[in-house]
Amino acid sequence: MQTKVKMCGLRRVEEIQLAHTLGVDAIGFVLYPASKRALSLDEAIALRSSIATPMQLVVLVVNPSVDEVNEIIRRVKPDIIQFHGDESGEFCEQFAYPYWRAVRVGAPELCTADELKHYMAQYPNAQKFLFDAYSSGHYGGSGIRFDLGILDALELDVQRYIIAGGINISNVDEVLGKYPFIDLSSGIEEEAGIKSLTKMRDFMAYIHAQTTDNTV
Ligand SMILES: O=C(O)c1ccccc1NCC(=O)[C@H](O)[C@H](O)COP(=O)(O)O
C-alpha cells in the first residue's frame, strides 16, 4: 500500500519547497493563534504562492467564526479545510467546501468505537477523518499517540482515514501498510514551530524505502 503523507505546521518557504521535492502529498498551515506553529492570515497568503502542485494545502482551524472561514477560503484558497476544534457537523458542512474532520480519540465522549461512530456520523460530507490523540489543554500537535486498536472496530472505509498523533521515524512502522494516509508535525521538528529539514528528508526516505521493500 502506498502511504500518503501530510506534514503539518510548516511556516518557512524552505520547508514548503523541501516538502514538495520530497513528494509530500499535503502540507498544513495552522491558522490557530494559540499554536506555536500559528500563521497569520497574511503569512498564509504570502506562503501560498510557494506551494506547487500536486502537493495539497490544508488549512487548519480551531473553533473559527463563519467570517474567518469564508475569508480563508476566499484569500488563501486552500485545497482543504481541517476542522480541529469543537466545530459541529452543521458548522463544517455549511461552507460546501472540501474539509477534513479531526477526531480527537480519547476526548470525553470519544473513547469507545460506538462514540466515535456516532461522532463521525455528524460529518457526512467530510472528505476524510483525521484521527489524532486527545490531550487535555491542547487541540493538536502534541506528539501524543493513541491506541490504534480502537479504529479496527469502526468498520468504516479506511480510505477515509488519516492517522496522526505522535508519529515519527521510530514508530511509523506501526501504521505503514495498514493506513493509506498519515500526518505528523512534532516528529519532524527541531523545536515547536521549526521543522527540521534533516528529519523531513530522513522521514520521507524511510517511508519510500519501506514502500519499495514491501512491493518487491
Ligand atoms: O500543530 C498544532 O500546533 C495544532 C494546534 C491546534 C490544533 C491542531 C494542531 N495540529 C494539527 C495536526 O494536524 C497535527 O499534525 C496533528 O495534531 C499531529 O501532531 P503531532 O502529534 O505533533 O504529530
Image (cartoon, rainbow, N blue to C red):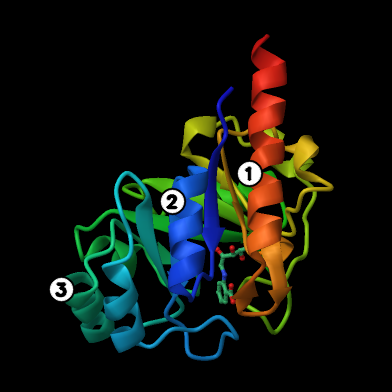
Q: Which label sits in the foreground, 1 or 3?
A: 1
Q: Which residue is mark 2?
A: 20
Which label number is shown at residue 96? none
> Residue 200: image x %, image y %?
64, 55
Give the distance between the C-alpha atoms of the residues marked 2 and 1, in whole angstroms.
Answer: 11 Å
Give the amino acid at mark 1.
Answer: Met
Establish whether ligand 1 lies closer than 8 Å to the Cβ of label 2: no
Establish whether ligand 1 lies closer than 8 Å to the Cβ of label 1: no
Q: Which residue is mark 3?
A: 74
The quadrant in which residue 210 appears is top right
Look at the numbered disc 2 and give the secondary structure of its residue: helix
Front residue of 45 and 74 = 45
Say if mark 1 contacts mark 3, CB within 8 Å.
no
Is 66 on the left-hand or right-hand side of 172? left
Give the amino acid at mark 2.
Answer: His
Give the amino acid at mark 3.
Answer: Arg
Front residue of 203 and 145 = 203
> Residue 17: image x %, image y %?
43, 59
- Ligand 1 falls in which quarter? bottom right
Look at 27% across and 60% down and name the residue there: 93
Which label number is shown at residue 204? 1
Is 182 on the left-hand or right-hand side of 65? right
Q: Which label sits in the foreground, 2 or 3?
A: 2
Look at the numbered disc 1 and give the secondary structure of its residue: helix
